[in-house]
Image: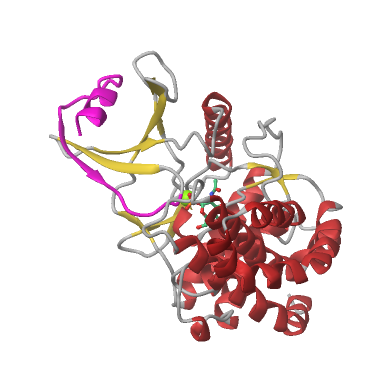
């Protein structure tokens, strides 16, 4: 608490701070909800610098992306859309450093909430549409140059190579527990490389790169999607990664670490609702080549996440926040089960996408 209060001294607030509450969610940064005596609310985040080692480059991107979104919102009169609003420090900077620790503050959007998973078709459709709007707006007109904050973020073959390396050097006990899922991932390596080569040949666009359903905020009353938040991974990349990751998060199980693997499957209704929403906005920009890799992304993205979670488990949980030591292993198993089911459904997915 005293740490947070001392950070807040770096900002110009119009009324004294009343409460500081730790917020749930997010596997990387730590978030706190700040409420002032007059009821103004902010989100303060402690940036995870082992994931984002260069905070100035990260925040330069967030500044450019929010500027671009604001410009597009005005141009297109998107009155209801909300854009992440950075609170600048007294020195006019978008982040603040205290003893090697980096923080930032955003406005909290009133009457809003994310969904952690969604099972009504309209919310799923709206989630797809929100990410579709984001990708369409970010790729229209003059495009900002962005820093590469995490290199090869969606390079799935490389993620599998990293897993191979970690698997070889992991302690025997962890390796044994990871064996089955690791072998499944390795067995998919060639197919993944094939998908990746086609994906890589697609246009390099500004994409969100972390299209988890809880990165969209909704109006509590109307249930409408207000906008896309968590802009940390917005970089040049492939639109199919946004599609596949969104499907992974909203058409997979509600919990990323679901332990009952018999209940893990790709919900085709949610897949279709998300895809309809996403494509309703991006269809005019998506090329035939990009369309051709959408189906593969629905299999590749859960597999990629499985590889990333398993690598982190083998490395001793240094990247994703965990609530218990085996959580990354559970996440890896769950995402592998989702990838397995998604791959089975690829013929059906491809057939359906052709009708869109
Ligand atoms: C991380 O921080 P959060 O929860 O929005 C991760 C994503 C993963 C996601 C899985 C920078 O996102 O890539 O898909 O966890 N973000 C980073 O839950 O690695
Ligand atoms: Mg996030």
Tell me: residue 299, above or below residue 213. below
Q: Is residue 278 above or below residue 37?
A: below
Position in image of residue 288 (x %, y %):
85, 63
Classify residue 208 as left or right of residue 327.
Answer: right
Residue 244 x, y percent position in the rendering:
66, 64
Residue 252 spot, x, y in % from top left = 54, 74
Q: Where does the magenta region start and end?
A: 1-27
Q: Is residue 207 visible?
A: yes
Q: Quadrant of residue 34?
A: top left
- On-image quarter of the C terminus: bottom right
Residue drawn at the location 69% of the way across and 30% of the way down? 145
Taking the spot 59% from the left edge, 77% from the top edge, the residue there is 337
User: In the image shown, does 66 or 80 lie closer to the viewer?
Assistant: 66
Q: Is residue 326 magenta?
A: no
- Closer to the camera in the image, 10 or 143: 10
Residue 277: tell me if it is visible.
no
| The stretch drawn in magenta includes residue 13 | yes
Give the quadrant of the N terminus.
Answer: top left
Task: Single out the residue that lies furthest toward the top.
Answer: 91
State left or right for residue 347 relative to residue 11. right
Q: Of residues 56 and 225, which is closer to you in this image?
A: 56
Extreme front residue here? 172
């Amino acid at each position: 608490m005293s740490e947070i209060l001392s950070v807040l001294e770096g900002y110009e607030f119009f009324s004294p701070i009343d409460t500081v509450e730790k917020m749930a969610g997010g596997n990387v940064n730590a978030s706190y909800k700040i409420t002032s005596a007059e009821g103004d609310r902010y989100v303060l985040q402690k940036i995870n610098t082992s994931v984002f080692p260069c905070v100035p480059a990260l925040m330069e991107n967030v500044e450019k992306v929010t500027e671009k979104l604001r410009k597009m919102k005005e141009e297109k009169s998107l009155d209801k859309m909300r854009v992440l609003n950075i609170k600048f420090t007294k020195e006019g900077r978008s982040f603040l450093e205290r003893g090697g620790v980096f923080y930032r503050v955003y406005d909290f959007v009133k009457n809003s909430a994310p969904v952690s998973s969604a099972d009504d078709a309209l919310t799923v459709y709206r989630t797809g549409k929100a990410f579709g709007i984001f990708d369409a707006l970010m790729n229209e007109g003059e495009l900002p140059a962005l820093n590469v904050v995490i290199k090869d973020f969606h390079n799935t073959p490389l993620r599998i190579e990293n897993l191979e390396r970690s698997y070889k050097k992991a302690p025997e006990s962890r390796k044994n527990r990871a064996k089955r899922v690791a072998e499944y991932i390795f067995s998919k390596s060639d197919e993944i490389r094939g998908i990746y080569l086609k994906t890589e040949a697609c246009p390099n666009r500004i994409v969100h790169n972390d299209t988890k359903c809880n990165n969209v905020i909704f109006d509590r009353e109307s249930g409408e999607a207000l906008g896309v938040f968590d802009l940390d991974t917005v970089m040049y990349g492939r639109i199919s990664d946004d599609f596949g990751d969104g499907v992974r998060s909203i058409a997979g199980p509600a919990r990323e670490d679901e332990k009952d693997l018999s209940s893990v499957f790709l919900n085709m209704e949610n897949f279709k609702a998300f895809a309809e929403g996403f494509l309703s906005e991006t269809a005019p920009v998506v090329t035939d080549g990009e369309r051709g890799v959408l189906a593969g992304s629905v299999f590749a993205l859960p597999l990629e996440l499985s590889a990333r979670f398993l690598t982190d488990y083998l490395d001793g949980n240094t990247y994703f926040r965990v609530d218990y030591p085996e959580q990354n292993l559970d996440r890896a198993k769950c995402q592998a089960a989702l990838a397995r089911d998604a791959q089975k459904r690829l013929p059906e997915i491809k057939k359906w996408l052709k009708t869109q």
